């Protein structure tokens, strides 16, 4: 039998994973990818949660295609991931990689600061070309909304900037590799809990202090995101199951998963179904007293997942695991 016949119509990455990834975390990766595909095939929808620095790790190389092919229906992300995909979009050529970052001395770090290079592990984000450029772009939409007495969520302001086309001249990567551009084109729902904890969140606070923005509430808040999510979850699950694919730990996952116990316990809407799929990629080892290191079954006690909910945990580096899972789902 030829190799092509043995592999059917599966592409090289999927074939490699299914042949070699047979045990332990490798097997969990394949199981999670198959479970994700099965959830979609059964008519389900999926929320992807982005923590860590996945945008600076250029997850858009695969996540953007997941969005375009309707494999993602909602994103929950940190403010850093929201902005850093756009930083990379407009300033990629000015980034510097520091592969020897483990050997940097405090003096070496100070030299990077003097050059206005903000380090994220092995990658330095340039302040002027990335952060300040987008600060100027966001100030325009913030102040205009403020003047019009309008209010928008953080991601909606980004969509306004990206959809305007005013900054396309600065694009330094292939636009198809930006997950934020893909999301803006589809008007994909995004929730950004704790957006204030981001570079542009700090810049917005500065704009309020300076008086550039008169109404601090021009950017809508995390509580408003939760009330929006409650309506979204209620509506979607009337017709299909909603799953949760969590990359990393922290608020990007902890915030949205709580919508179900809130609906059940605080609003007494007990007929609303639990999350229909759960997977977390994390290098936080299983431990006591750690949210990120808690096994999925612990979430049963909080009313977030059920006994029958498909559950996966992959204890590994998300920058390695997530692109492979997405490639499997996409059939690459």
Image (spheres, rainbow, N blue to C red):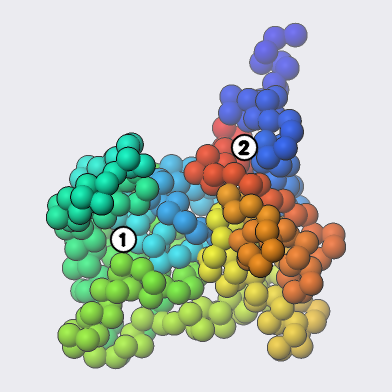
Mark 1 Cα-neighbour bin, 10 Å: few <14, some 14–19, many ≥20: some
Q: In terms of secondary structure, where does tag 1 sit?
A: helix
Label 2 SS: helix
**Place of residue 218 in the rendered image (x, y in percent of width and height, measured from the top left):** 33, 85
Image quarter hosting the C terminus: top right
Residue at 22% x, 80% y: name it: 207
Question: What x and y, as percent, mark residue 327?
Answer: 57, 37
**44 vs 292, nearest the viewer:** 292
Mark-to-mark CA distance, 2 and 1: 29 Å
Q: Name above or below for residue 174 compared with residue 223.
A: above
- Describe residue 310's horizontal placement relative to residue 126 as left or right: right
Q: Position of residue 33 (x, y in %)?
A: 67, 43
- The quarter holding residue 234 reads bottom right
Label ID, residue 162: 1
Q: Are marks 2 and 1 in contact (CB under 8 Å)?
A: no
Q: Is residue 239 visible?
A: no
Which residue is located at x 65 percent, y 75 percent? 258
Q: Which residue sits furthest top?
A: 1
**Res. 155 image quadrant:** bottom left
Residue at image point 66% right, 47% down = 314
Q: Residue at the left extreme?
A: 114
Earlier in the chain: of badge 2 and badge 1, it is 1
Q: Nearer the viewer, residue 62 or 257?
A: 257
Asked if residue 162 can be seen in this view, the reply is yes
- Which residue in the protein does label 2 denote? 328
Residue 270 position within the rendered picture, expressed as x and y whole percent measured from the top left: 80, 82
Specify few, some or many for label 2: CA neighbours under 10 Å numbering under 14, 14-19, or 20 or more: many
């Amino acid at each position: 039998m030829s190799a092509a016949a043995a592999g059917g119509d599966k592409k090289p990455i999927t074939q490699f994973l299914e042949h070699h990834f047979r045990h332990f975390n490798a097997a969990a990766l394949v199981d999670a990818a198959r479970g994700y595909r099965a959830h979609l095939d059964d008519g389900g929808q999926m929320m992807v949660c982005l923590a860590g620095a996945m945008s600076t790790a250029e997850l858009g190389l695969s996540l953007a295609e997941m969005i375009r092919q309707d494999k993602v229906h909602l994103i929950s992300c940190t403010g850093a991931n929201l902005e850093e995909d756009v930083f990379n979009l407009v300033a990629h050529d000015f980034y510097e990689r520091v592969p020897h970052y483990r050997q940097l001395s405090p003096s070496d770090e100070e030299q990077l600061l003097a050059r206005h290079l903000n380090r994220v592990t092995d990658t330095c984000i340039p302040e002027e070309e990335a952060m300040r450029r987008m600060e100027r772009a966001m100030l325009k939409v913030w102040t205009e909304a403020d003047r019009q007495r309008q209010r928008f969520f953080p991601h909606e302001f980004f969509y306004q900037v990206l959809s305007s086309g005013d900054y396309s001249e600065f694009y330094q990567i292939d636009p198809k590799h930006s997950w934020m551009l893909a999301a803006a084109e589809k008007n994909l729902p995004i929730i950004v809990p704790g957006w204030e904890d981001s570079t542009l969140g700090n810049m917005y606070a500065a704009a309020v202090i300076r008086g550039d923005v008169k109404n601090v509430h021009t950017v809508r808040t995390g509580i408003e995101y939760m009330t929006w999510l409650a309506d979204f979850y209620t509506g979607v699950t009337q017709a299909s199951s909603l799953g949760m694919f969590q990359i990393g730990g922290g608020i990007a996952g902890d915030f949205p998963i709580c919508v179900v116990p809130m609906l059940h316990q605080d609003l007494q809407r007990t007929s609303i179904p639990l999350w229909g799929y759960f997977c977390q990629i994390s290098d936080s080892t299983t431990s006591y007293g750690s949210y990120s290191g808690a096994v999925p079954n612990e979430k049963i006690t909080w009313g977030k997942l059920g006994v029958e909910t498909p559950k996966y945990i992959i204890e590994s580096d998300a920058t390695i695991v997530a692109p492979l899972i997405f490639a499997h789902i996409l059939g690459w």
